[in-house]
Amino acid sequence: MDWVSVPLQTDLQWSLQFARLPELGAALVLSMAVGFERQFRGKQAGVRTHALVGLGSALFMLVSKYGFADLLGTTGIGLDPSRIAAQIVSGIGFLGAGIIVFRSDAVRGLTTAASVWLTAAIGMACGGSLFALAGVVTAAYFLVVFVGPLLSRLTHPVGSAELQIEYRDGQGLLRDIVEVITSRQWRISRLRTGTHRTDPGYVAVFIAAEGGTDSGDLLDAVASVEGVRSVDWADDEDSSS
């Protein structure tokens, strides 16, 4: 063995690791951006979950690409750098499945599960030094999540509205919310309350109303009630009740 080459190889390995830190940094920043949007909406998986998923995916990619470089050329050993990356795609499905909940005849958490899956892809892209693709996909995510509710408002049936409302418990806001709805000539046909699934200090209220003309105006009016944390269409696939 050439003992002189051992310190040189060690120095190269350390320099390679430090050179890959920008990939991890990019994955962390972009993943936190996606997670912040989810957390701002009060969803189950927030900044921490998305940041860990993106950062972990980037590290897996880097290990897949560079972690076995010292074994290349060794007799009897063959490496496929894509194997670890492929396992990330499969493994992230278990985390996403834990976020999806079926309750009250509706599926909840699909969008959040999809955002975690997308964050893993963003982390993998960063780990692969595909920064432009990672940035574009992150921007596309925000485009989708902000344009989606606007389209829902435009396509929501006239004369009916189903809202999912969240507010802090103990403030007596339900009376104010009902007053706002009825004052706009809406008639409440169904109302259901329950403790928020992930934030015990909050109440999740489902309200179905009929007879009005502008469901978008109704949603804005309820959202303007002081103390209400979030309002969304109850048939949205990612309601966090």
Image (cartoon, helix red, strand yellow):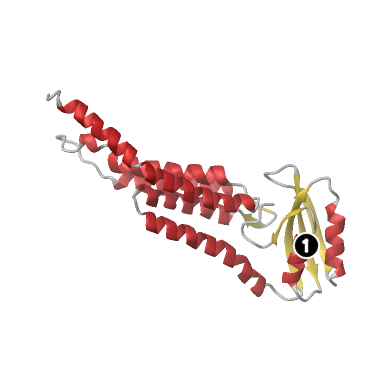
The answer to which of 77 and 182 lies nearer the viewer is 182
Q: Is residue 90 visible?
A: no
- Residue 178: where, in percent of width, then height? 85, 61
- Residue 181: where, in percent of width, then height? 83, 65
- Residue 39: where, in percent of width, then height? 61, 49
Q: Which residue is mark 1?
A: 222
As helix, strand or loop, the secondary structure at mark 1 comes to helix
* Residue at x-position 21% and y-position 26%: 7
Indicate the quadrant containing the N terminus: top left, top right, bottom left or bottom right.
top left
The answer to which of 14 and 45 lies nearer the viewer is 14
- Residue 53: where, in percent of width, then height? 48, 44
The image quarter in which residue 63 lies: top left
The image quarter in which residue 18 lies: top left
The image quarter in which residue 217 lies: bottom right
Q: Decide: few, some or many residues near mark 1? Use Cα within 10 Å; few <14, some 14-19, many ≥20.
A: many
Q: Is residue 60 above or below residue 177?
A: above
Query: What's the amino acid at mark 1?
Result: Val
Would residue 146 be found to the left or right of residue 8 on screen? right
Task: Count up the numbered dots.
Answer: 1
Would residue 84 be found to the left or right of residue 101 on screen? left
Would residue 68 be found to the left or right of residue 231 on screen? left
* Residue at x-position 74% and y-position 56%: 165
Q: Is residue 202 visible?
A: yes
